[in-house]
Image (cartoon, rainbow, N blue to C red):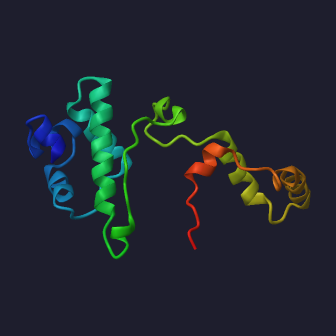
Amino acid sequence: MGLLRKYKQDTFALAEACKYPEQTIYEWRYGRGDAPSPGHLIKMARAFGKTRKEVQENHLSLLYAHLLDDCSGPGAPFINLEVLPTALPMVSACRLPVPVRRSSELDLEAIKKHIWYDTSLQQSVRELARPLRGKPIPSSLNQTEPKNTL
């Protein structure tokens, strides 16, 4: 609704711009049916935005609202969503509609799939991990880790 108010449009205009049935927009508006997917959010962000910056702002507000909608239930008081002032360089450089994964994440995923039955892979991982066991975590990562107060 914030997007519609910002551009002084109605649900019909949004449905037409995104080529969605108007009923789908109404269902999302009132929290019924399936929630919009990440692709839907991107399409709606682009519906009225004229510049890249407008589209980014629209997408951020839609994503934030979508995440807030998911924050319901018994654990809701313990969830805090925060918009950071700047994005990580890897994220801000991305122009894809899907999250970017580092190549190391993909490598670790491949290792995870094969490590249980590949003994040579197990040995290679042990050799790689041995010098890391005593290595301190960089201070920039240490600051983001939650402190144990118990």
Instruction: Say which quarter of the image contains residue 33.
Output: bottom left
Q: Quadrant of the C terminus?
A: bottom right
Residue at image location 16% in from the left, 61% down from the top: 30
Residue at image location 28% in from the left, 43% down from the top: 61
Instruction: Say which quarter of the image contains residue 31.
Output: bottom left
Q: Position of residue 120 (x, y in %)?
A: 91, 56
The single residue placed furthest to the bottom in the displayed view is: 74
Residue at image location 26% in from the left, 29% down from the top: 54
Left/right of residue 29 with respect to residue 37 in the rendered view: left
User: As displayed, is residue 105 above or below residue 87?
Assistant: below
All told, the count of numbered labels is 0
Residue at image location 82% in from the left, 51% down from the top: 132
Q: Position of residue 81 (x, y in %)?
A: 37, 54
Q: Position of residue 68 (x, y in %)?
A: 30, 57
Instruction: Say which quarter of the image contains residue 73.
Output: bottom left
Q: Position of residue 64 (x, y in %)?
A: 31, 49
Seen from the viewer's position, the closer of residues 117 and 73 is 73
User: As displayed, is residue 63 above or below residue 45?
Assistant: below
The single residue placed furthest to the front in the displayed view is: 149
Seen from the viewer's position, the closer of residues 42 and 88 is 88
Seen from the viewer's position, the closer of residues 100 and 140 is 140
Left/right of residue 88 with respect to residue 138 in the rendered view: left
